[in-house]
Image: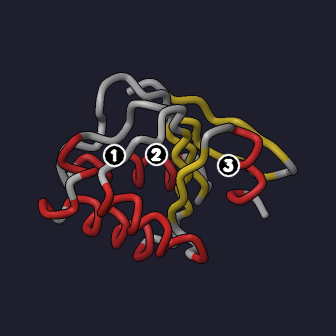
Amino acid sequence: MNYQVLESRGKKYLYILGESALIQKESDVMDFISLAIEHDTRFMVFDNNILSEDFLNLRTGLAGAVLQKFANYNLKAAVIKDDQNFPMRFQEMVSDLSTSNTFQVFNNMEDALNWLLA
């Protein structure tokens, strides 16, 4: 797993570089949670290719399980995705979560950090 511990506005966050659909099953998110705990942060930014097809397909339940883990551990996660051509149901979920304090999708780092570290 390729990641960096960065700091902005006096807060540390994990920047996890997308290698190839890293969130493929529910247990994958525990690696990220462990990293956050290890580095004493509750903020994560995921790069472009972090989301697998199973995550984007809400019927699998993967997105819901992962987001519940983020909420349970009081973590905030932002995904930076250049191409935001998501399946319709996933877009609806992201829209519903627009007031959430747990998960958001952005098309650039600046907007992601503004939300994440606010």
Can you say whether 37 is above or below 50 in the image?
Answer: below
Q: x%, y% of residue 33?
A: 41, 54
- Provide the secondary structure element on which disc 1 rests: helix
At 51% from the left edge and 51% from the top edge, which residue is drawn?
A: 36
> Which amino acid, mark 3?
Ala
In the rendered image, the quadrant that contains the N terminus is top left
Q: CA distance from mark 3 to mark 2?
A: 19 Å
At 20% from the left edge and 54% from the top edge, which residue is drawn?
A: 57
> Which amino acid, mark 1?
Asp
- Category of crowding for the residue at label 2, using alpha-carbon neighbours closer than 10 angstroms: few (below 14), some (14–19), many (at least 20): some
Give whichever of discs 3 and 2 has the lower sequence position.
2
Foreground tag (3 vs 2): 3
Q: Nearer the viewer, residue 95 or 38?
A: 95
Q: How many numbered marks are there? A: 3
Mark drawn on residue 31: 1
Mark drawn on residue 112: 3
Residue 18, image quadrant: top left
Residue furthest left in the image: 60
- Provide the secondary structure element on which disc 2 rests: helix
Q: CA distance from mark 1 to mark 3?
A: 21 Å
Mark drawn on residue 95: none
> Which amino acid, mark 2?
Leu
At 81% from the left edge and 44% from the top edge, which residue is drawn?
A: 8
Picture colour scheme? secondary structure
Can you say whether 53 is above or below 10 in the image?
Answer: above
Q: x%, y% of residue 83?
A: 48, 33
Q: Which residue in the structure is indicated by mark 2?
A: 35
